[in-house]
Image: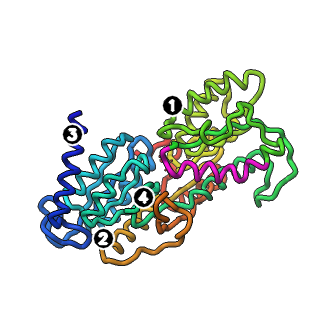
Amino acid sequence: MRKLFATASIAALALSLAACGGSGAGGGTDEGAGSGGSDEQKTVGVAMPEQTLQRWINDGKAVREGLEEAGYKVELQYAGNDIPTQQEQIDQMITKGVDVLILASIDGAALSTQLDAAEAANIPVIAYDRLLTGNKNVDFYVTFDNFNVGVQQGTSLLTALGIVDADGKETGEKGPFNIEMFAGSPDDNNAGFFFNGAMSVLKPHIDAGTLVVKSGQSEFGQVATQGWDQAKAQSRMDDLIAKSYQNDKIHGVLASNDALARGAITAMQNGGYDAASMPPVTGQDAEIASVKMINEGLQYSTIFKDTRKLAAQSVQAAKDLLEGKAPETNDTETYDNGVVTVPSFLLESDVVTKDNYSSLLIDSGYYTQANVDKGSVD
Ligand code: BGC
């Protein structure tokens, strides 16, 4: 109750500040610089969802560094995957009078009140990686080509099973191969893009009988994982093994990200699979724990989305918006948020396997080989 009241009163304060002509984009007013900064220096509010996944730690760090290098002050908050906490953090940023917001939401549909308050205070909003939905007050979206990430995941599973060759050509291999699928969180707009992208290449082979989903669970609603929670993926895989694979082997797993991949792998290890018998499992994010497992042959692939590039793109967009310019877009059609189609910049991603992790991740300075060997960046 207390928290609810606090949230409501902060939102009300934000609205009243806005009504009094509080700071907005390019305002440069006293309120605009947050606590105690110079009038000149603009502040960017950055909201990130959580810190259990290494990717969001990397994102936060890269965005902060990029913004600071560009001369801005940064108010960076992580919300522990708790929606009310994230709402409250953004309310506070608006109340403090940040000049731009960069928001990586937990639930893309849950920030409408905050988007309205930002609009009222004339603060531009950049959706970071995940689309903000159900509200017109989203100025820009920086992300990866999320449908293509799914296509890459599905294709990498087909490659691992020998159904397509290294050039993506069908080999004539008919299997049948038993596969199971683990999709992301239903409140994350990206999760459907990843799943649909993967299904666009897997479904024809399911229809042909080359791929068999023995559990019968092949709809997004059946395979989605609330909160992208690794433990939930593990326990769903425990169930699948118990119910559908007592006398049969799993030959492949589509996992929409590395956390889900590791959950599925742990369940399979507990179910008797070892490095030699582990089926190919896909992933996403090139998290160091998963890259180590790829090097050891436990996970087959991941998708590298270079968070340094995403951060740089969002910093550039923030700069442009603060200077009253429209940020560069390369997609103005895909991301309809239910109210408006949000102008977007989509970055490309790469499939990482044991064969190429060194050139993609080590040579580019993302990790060192020592990081990979340890499975940690510390
Ligand atoms: C991101 C993925 C990430 C997932 C879980 C998605 O929105 O695009 O990179 O693995 O959220 O945090």
Pointer 4 residue Cβ closer than 8 Å to ligand 1: no
Point out residue 195 in the picture as x, y percentages from the top left corner.
62, 48
Distance between the alpha carbons at the discs numbered 4 and 1:
26 Å
Pointer 1 residue Cβ closer than 8 Å to ligand 1: no
Nearer-the-camera pick, 331 or 159: 331
- Give the labeled residue for mark 1: 231
Q: Are marks 1 and 2 in contact (CB under 8 Å)?
A: no
Q: Quadrant of the C terminus?
A: top left
Element marked by disc 1:
helix
Query: At label 1, which amino acid type do we have?
Result: Ala
Which one is closest to the eye, mark 1 or mark 3? 3
- Give the labeled residue for mark 2: 70
Nearer-the-camera pick, 327 or 246: 327
Which one is closest to the eye, mark 3 or mark 2? 3
Distance between the alpha carbons at the discs numbered 4 and 2:
18 Å
Distance between the alpha carbons at the discs numbered 1 and 3:
33 Å
Element marked by disc 4:
strand
Query: At label 4, which amino acid type do we have?
Result: Tyr
Q: Which mark is residue 5?
A: 3
Asked if residue 40 lies in the magenta stretch, the reply is no
Query: At label 3, which amino acid type do we have?
Result: Phe
- Give the labeled residue for mark 4: 128
Element marked by disc 3:
helix
**Which comes before the other along the chain, label 1 or label 3?**
3
**Which comes before the other along the chain, label 3 or label 2?**
3
Asked if residue 202 lies in the magenta stretch, the reply is yes
**Which comes before the other along the chain, label 4 or label 2?**
2
* Mark 3 neighbour density, 10 Å: few (under 14) some (14–19) many (20 or more): few
**Which comes before the other along the chain, label 1 or label 2?**
2
Helix, strand or loop: magenta stretch: helix
- Number of numbered discs present? 4
Q: Which range of residues does the magenta coloring cover? A: 187-204
